Image: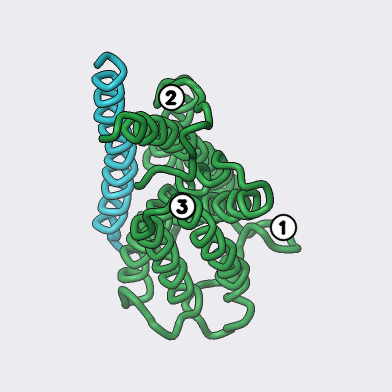
Amino acid sequence: MPDTTGPFYAAYIITALVYSGYALSIWLRAKKTREKLKTLENS
Amino acid sequence: MSPSSSSSTVALPESKPIFDWFFALAVASVVGIFIRAIYFTPLEALQGAAQKIYYVHVPSAVGAYIAVSITALSALTYLWLRDERADRMAEASAEVGLIFTTMVLITGPLWAHRIWGAWWAWWDLRLTLTLFLWFLIIGYLILRGAIEDPAMRARYSAVLAVLAVLVIPFIHLSVYFQSAGLHPKPIVLQPEKPKLPGEMLTTFLLSMCAFSLFCLALIRARYRLGVDRDRLAILEAERGL
């Protein structure tokens, strides 16, 4: 059996990083938007 | 992305949590499938560990199909009803579709390089059509960012979204059009019994469910971000900011 663990680990790590990074970006954008909303609504 | 096609007279729904129990369930499913695929699924005899890329590559492709199909359905709904919620949904699912398509294009070459001996093959229909879909989604999002008028933005981008989804059947059927391509014909969705052994098939099917759920959860979260952005745009417009 060939040793193909390199691409296997790379694929799983990149998948985890990209999907969690995207989820984090949604959360950060929402946080920023809600902060602006709060400021505007209170002003 | 830019605010949706809402006018200042339209009341937007209240803000909801971006991440909730549904998102937590989706994340737990994907984490569970990672653990099952890495530690509890047997290695394939010829390819070794690289074959396990299958459990993230194909479900990512299905996630991309789901997201782009939702974009097109929402776009059609917008063109029919002129409902801003449909436009917001189209935008949300297009962005998620871009992420899933990107993952297909990253994990595929990682697998291909070790098994086929090449990162990429331009003559393989499925590869090039998937890249074409990726460009279409990028084009859709750039188009949305380039048009100021919300109604025009929603209408033009909806037309592009409906056209973009037409690529998906060609991607899926490309392995039948091109008998000498790099991608094999389906090994699960075929008239005969699936060719995968039991444990691998279970991991694959669970992975499909987990990634589909995760795709829907991301679209839902991104839609909620869109609601907040539209509310912010309306407030800013009302106050002349």
- Residue at 49% of width from left, 38% of height from top? B7
Tell me the residue that label 3 is attached to. Answer: B94
Q: Residue furthest top?
A: A42
Q: Is residue B4 above or below residue A41?
A: below
Callouts 2 and 3 close, C-beta under 8 Å: no
| Residue B87: x %, y % from top left | 53, 46
Q: Is residue B125 above or below residue B185?
A: below
Tell me the residue that label 2 is attached to. Answer: B24
Q: Which one is in front in this view, the residue at disc 2 or the one at disc 1?
A: 2
- Chain ID for label 3? B
Which chain, by letter, is cyan? A
Look at label 3 and name its amino acid: Ala
SS for dot 2: helix
SS for dot 1: loop
Look at label 1 and name its amino acid: Lys
Chain B, hue in figure = green
Rounded to the nearest angstrom, the CA distance separating label 2 from label 3 is: 22 Å
- Residue at 51% of width from left, 62% of height from top? B156
Q: Which one is in front in this view, the residue at disc 3 or the one at disc 1?
A: 3
